[in-house]
Image: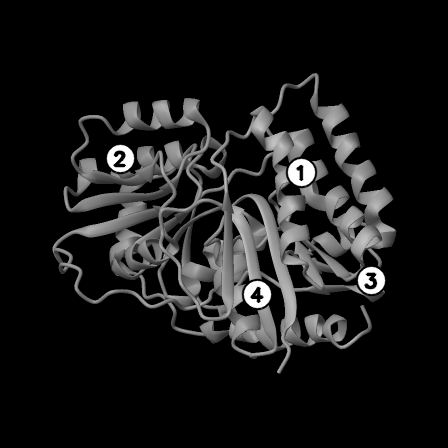
Amino acid sequence: MNKTKLLIASTLKPIDDSRMYEKFGVSLAKTNEYEVNIIGFASKNTLTHDSIHFHPHGPFGRMSFDRITSSLKIFKTYIKVKPQIIICNTHELLIVTSIYRILFGGRIIYDVRENYVKNIRNTNVFNPILRPFLAAYVRVKELITKPFFDGFILAERVYTEQLGFIPSRKSILIENKYMPVEVPENEPMVNSENTVLLYSGTISASNGIFEAIEITHQLHQIDSSIKLCIIGYCALKKDLIQLKEAISGKDYIELIGGDFLVPHHQIIQQIKKADFGFVLKKPNNGVNDDKILTRLFEYSANKLPMLLLNNSTWINFCDEFNAAIPIDPSYFDPEKVLALMKDSRFYTQGDTKTSLWESEESRFLDFIAQFSNSKV
């Protein structure tokens, strides 16, 4: 049986990224109808799969010249692999992916994981003077390449309203829900006398890492059994330096990662061990107000109670399961929060299976199948 060659490509996501590999890649591979290829940032995690081929690149910094030239290197991989379907995972690959289709045919799909224009305008990653020009450049790329794309996958429900240039007849919403992964069972048992708080995922000031540290500190002052585990990667050097200074001398805070990418299964291990998870991502001028964060799916699927920023979208999500304690990092009563943590019962209602990838998988596979079955 001839399999359809399919390639999933990103510049700054790791090659073992949970969406590209664990969800899209593994789901497609298990149908036995696709030869799956994944291009992503090099990872320390060793990956093997009979029907998935990995093409790592990097490393390079977010603001480096190598990041600019990476698109050309990825285009060379396109030519080498000769995919019949490409799922483009970032705006940086829109032009080279369109060029590939013009020259070699095939079907191309844009997996829209972020509202990049809104992010550029409202975050501090780029120089304020450059932001309007960079945002305009990205939007122009999206507009001029739109006619070449056969399909669009939206990672957030709110993008159907925010991104008016995407035709609804060609798009599908596939949320970034939790795909269960195998976790080694030979880990040492956690001290049951401790209450372990967890901060997982991208480590940054904008994601609320320093608020998580301060909240933990105040709770620990009252109850010495309160501990914090921070696990993930910190891309911004200034945030990493500040992080290490903030946890220096605090033996009740553990850092796993920081200056290196942490395999996703290790993050899931910590989710399963923890007693509460922080969700404190900042609004950033409304960028994050209506987004359902990946960690909301990960925490709820694993029935981990949350200390949650007072965001109405996230509170509504958690209320379905009775999953969280809303908190205002700028002003909160540590004694009251601690009492709620000890006395409240969580996950007493709702069905957390709605947070699992299996609720998205069949729709995703059906969407991709229409391009596999069409002439290329």
Q: Is residue 37 above or below residue 350?
A: above
Q: Amino acid at mark 2?
A: Gln
Q: Which residue is mark 3?
A: 168
Would residue 201 appear left or right of 113 to someone viewing this image?
left
Q: Which quarter of the image is occupied by the N terminus?
A: bottom right
Would residue 76 appear left or right of 229 to someone viewing this image?
right
- Separation of disc 4 and disc 3 at Cα? 27 Å
Q: Residue at x 16, y 35 (%)?
A: 251
User: Which dot marks residue 36?
Assistant: 4
Q: Amino acid at mark 3?
A: Ser
Q: Residue at x 36, y 59 (%)?
A: 305
- Separation of disc 2 and disc 4 at Cα? 48 Å
Q: Amino acid at mark 4?
A: Val
Crowding near the residue tagged with mark 2, few <14, some 14–19, many ≥20 C-alpha atoms within 10 Å: some
- Separation of disc 2 and disc 1 at Cα? 50 Å
- Separation of disc 4 and disc 1 at Cα? 21 Å
Q: Nearer the viewer, mark 2 or mark 3?
A: 3
Q: Which residue is mark 1?
A: 72
Q: Earlier in the sequence, mark 4 or mark 1?
A: 4
Q: Which residue is mark 2?
A: 218
Q: Nearer the viewer, mark 2 or mark 1?
A: 1
Q: Earlier in the sequence, mark 2 or mark 1?
A: 1
